[in-house]
Image (cartoon, grey):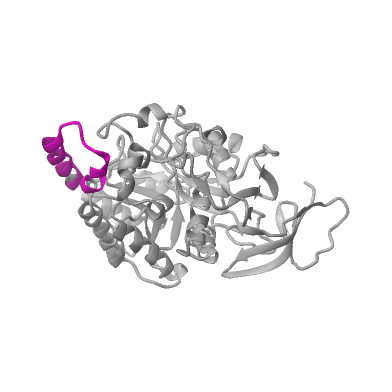
Amino acid sequence: MKNTLLRNATLINEGKSRECDVLIKAGRIETIGPHIIAPDGTKEFDLTGDYLLPGMIDDQVHFREPGMEHKGTIATESKAAVAGGITSYMEMPNCNPLTINTRTLLNKHERAAAGSHANYAFYLGATNNNLEDIKSIDQAITCGVKIFMGASTGDMLVDDRDTLEAIFASTPLLIATHCEDTPTILKNEALWKERFGEDIAFREHPKIRSEEACFLSSSLAVDLARRHGSRLHILHLTTEKEMQHFSSGDASEKRITAEACVHHLFFNETQYDDLGADIKCNPAIKKVSDQLALRAAINANLIDVIATDHAPHTLSEKARGYTTAPAGLPLVQHALLMMMDLVNDGVFTIEKVVEKTAHTPAVLFNVKERGFVREGYWADLVVMSKNQKTVVDESEIYSKCGWSPFHGHTFSSRVLQTFVNGRLKYDRGAFPDDTPGVALEFIRH
């Protein structure tokens, strides 16, 4: 690898903005400072007028491999991720076969080692029947235990109370939960089908996957974690009511933490009539008041992480009616651009976005030497233009599904370059280096 020097950057890191140079050597950040004198043969980039950010660590994605490769693969979805400034991701277990034991975890590692554009980690999925696998897992090969405490595909729903108690009592790993109460959802689905038959409007989705369903389930997760002293991370919060579960403060000192996803910050229920299935997701996008509460909770540090829950489906699947159209959005390519729009709208500061997308995920998951721009750390970096815009054109969608809920939208910023492990992986629409990413390492105490 040649040395790389990034000159005249506006570095956003650890709550501060400063003008500086960054020298990359052997994949790591060698020096940060003004007017660095580079060794001979160094490749230089002038970033005058551009932001330099630590790459996003996305703690929740569904890349569909193995078993659903018609929707996406590790290679295609990680390509879209680096085009969007995501340099590391943590992928979910609800594929086929389910990622619920050592064998299936190692299989995913092998697949990613062969073709992932970004760095990677994988969750071990919980079921009603794999408690012994959870207890015996090698902690080095997983980022945490994922529990679907709500409706899910296949056998991933964990609704046995004794199993839940045993998982929370026994695993030292971070427990990440999808919290929606299945009996409440099933009751609502029956009521809505009785009223509307199969012709349910998409605007009804947040009433079926309701605030009550979310609150009941997240309340159970918090109760289990508090009683057992577990490390709990609740994913994709959607309601104002649920904010009462969380406390402000330093994320590194919390045992119970929270995540919000970009689409719940960007969209609200007034947009269902225009976007329909394109924004159908679980948990549902809800009221304007919920959207505003989530934004406020991020600024107040009640919510600790911003992620994507990237979940691609084909256009033909999304073209179905409400009851059969699958839930999920392809988001990794545009997640940071969504957040930059909110920065430009005054919702967040860019420092807060970097904190929630890079710093805090690294801290909560104990990721080794990533998530910050520090000397000695891996050079996972994003160059973001302050001035160039991005017009979403489906000819430039890198997710395999080939569509975006943002078709025709103009974002106020543009991802120019993404460096993964010091290698230039994305450069203004080109992918100049096909060296695979590496498995994330975790500091386990």
Locate residue 295 relative to residue 116 in the image: left or right: left
> Percent from the top left, x then y, of residue 27?
71, 51
Vertical relation: 381 (above or below) 10: above
Residue drawn at (58%, 68%) of the image: 14
Q: Nearer the viewer, residue 300 or 64?
A: 300
Locate residue 285 relative to residue 382 in the image: left or right: left
Q: Is residue 199 magenta?
A: yes
Q: Is residue 245 magenta?
A: no
The quarter holding residue 347 reads: bottom left
Looking at the image, how many numbered discs can be counted on the residues? 0
> Percent from the top left, x then y, of residue 375?
69, 64
Locate residue 397 relative to residue 68 in the image: left or right: right
| Boundaries of the magenta span | 184-208
The quarter holding residue 5 reads: bottom right
Q: Is residue 141 visible?
A: no
The quarter holding residue 216 reads: bottom left
> Percent from the top left, x then y, of residue 353?
51, 61
Name the chief secondary structure element in magenta.
helix
Q: Nearer the viewer, residue 239 or 305?
A: 239
Q: Nearer the viewer, residue 224 or 149?
A: 149
Residue drawn at (50%, 37%) of the image: 108
Q: Is residue 202 visible?
A: yes
Vertical relation: 262 (above or below) 396: below
Q: Nearer the viewer, residue 107 or 72?
A: 72
> Percent from the top left, x then y, of residue 32?
72, 65
Locate residue 387 relative to residue 47 in the image: left or right: left
For the view shown, which residue lies furthest in the right direction?
Answer: 40
Vertical relation: 183 (above or below) 114: below
Residue drawn at (80%, 66%) of the image: 35
